[in-house]
Amino acid sequence: MSWGTDLWDQFENLDKHTQWGIDFLERYSKFVKERLEIEQTYAKQLRNLVKKYCPKRSKEDEPRFTSCLSFNAILNELNDYAGQREVVAEEMGHKVYGELMRYSQDLKGERKHHLQEGRKTQQYLDQCWKHMDNSKKKFERECREAEKSQMMYDRLDNDINATKSEVEKAKSQLYLRQHMAEESKNEYAAQLQNFNSEQWKHFNVSIPQIFKNLQDMDERRTVKLGETYRSFAEVERRVIPIISKCLEGMVTAAKNVDERRDSDIVVESFKSGFSPPAEFPFEDFSQNIQRTGSDSTIGTPKNEGGKPDPKHAIGRTKNKLWLFGKKPKAPTLEDLSHLPPEQRRKKLQHRIDELNKDLQKEMDQRDALNKMKDVYEKNPQMGDPGSLQPKISETICNMEKLRSEIHKNESWLSEVEGKHGSRSERRSSADVNHHTPHGRESPEGSYTDDQNQEHRSPPQPDPHDFDDEFDDDPLPAIGHCKALYSFDGSNEGTLVMIENDVLYIIEEDKGDGWTRVRKQSGEEGYVPTSYVEITLEKNSKGAVTYI
């Protein structure tokens, strides 16, 4: 069915229908907008809820119970779920609401154009009809005038009293009126033919085409609505897999709740390490009272002399009577001595682990700066090596501070564990085989790791071991080095060298700033690493140089 042929006379109704279609489209657009606003509000409220119940905590306050960890996991999944609701709102805004609003504006413009064309066509047909009607009325009027002239002429022509001039005048008037009537007739015929032609074009060509355009526009509007309905559902469908994963994560978090593990954590968290208090002894205060012979043995304590057992002195257990009462608050001390032994041990161990991590970071930073300095020294155009020296010094200072803190905490840990002496073996082994910072040479002939530190001494092996070591077969050379400065070798175990001397390397720097070398004469000893330029022959990629 076609609007152009079946509804050729329903212009006004089609005008109303197309306007209703656009209004319905905008109504649906408003619905989508309110829906996405609901999604945005819902997502925002979910995020606020997660933020409310998942506040920021320090590392020490992080929950360890499986029930708490599962709840945090559920909050994280809920936060991801809220993110998917935001995705739904955003997709609805761009792919549905925005598209509908743009299409609505296009429809309004297209409808206006088609209706203007229809009105112009109707106005032109009305104009043709007016011309035809005017010519028709004119023809009718001229015909009546001609009839009047004919009657006048006939009356005068039959009147014997009428003069000849009057008859001739009536005859001329009749001819004139007949001529004008004939012209009006021809004009009316032409206008009628033109109107009929335009009317046929109007109802068979123009109006059907305009109505067909309106019909196509309305059908496209209906198709667009169907597409946006589908897009509306597809937006939801696309996030369903991720939402399902969020829900699965919540179920998994619920399954991870372990009551046994939580009970063990309670024990680990609050175990003091103390032994339960011993029984209170009976203290007999009637020792000095005279008794009769029959009851002299009643109530006599087993302790000789009537003195209480010092192991069960009340004063020693008085501080442990807060089992079911309120535990007295102790001031927080740096060595954590206010804590029970077990808790103190765990806290100290955790603190040492954190300090070791920080120390490793500082050492990695130091090594990176040293490598960068080597690159700058080999390629001066890339940067100034001296600009890195303050940062290297700061890093070394931080390392020393961390080592001091680690040593202090290890001493406290040794005290808790009942050990005597240092726990230096607990220190991280990350600093083994790390070379000292480059460029730390002293013109006076002594090596320093930092400008503010005292001079380091070479390794001091046992004299007898040292002699045995040199009496055996010599160690193989692993490289060679060239002396950059002279060194007097005044300390025991060191080796004298002169600038530009070439020496064999038999042992690398172990991180203490000293390298073991051998002269061509066979004499061996230690020299400062920063005083020599080292080339290790075992490196197949090229020489490794320390300056």
Image: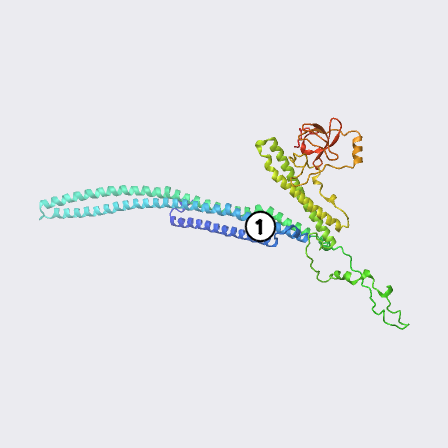
Residue drawn at the location 34% of the way across and 44% of the way down? 120
* In the rendered image, the vertical position of residue 404 relative to residue 287, given as above or below: above
Residue 479 visible in the shown view: yes
Element under disc 1: helix
**Residue nearest the viewer, comparing 236 with 284:** 284
Residue closest to the far bottom = 292
Residue 524 place in picture, x, y as percent = 75, 30
Residue closest to the far top = 520
Q: Is residue 313 left or right of residue 386?
A: right
* In the rendered image, the vertical position of residue 2 relative to residue 265, given as above or below: above
Q: Is residue 467 left or right of residue 114?
A: right
Residue drawn at the location 64% of the way across and 41% of the way down? 395
Residue 300 place in picture, x, y as percent = 87, 67
- At label 1, the amino acid type is Ala
- For the C terminus, the image quarter is top right
* In the rendered image, the vertical position of residue 152 relative to residue 433, given as above or below: below
**Residue nearest the viewer, comparing 282 with 194:** 282
Q: Quadrant of residue 396?
A: top right
Which residue bears the numbered disc 1? 82
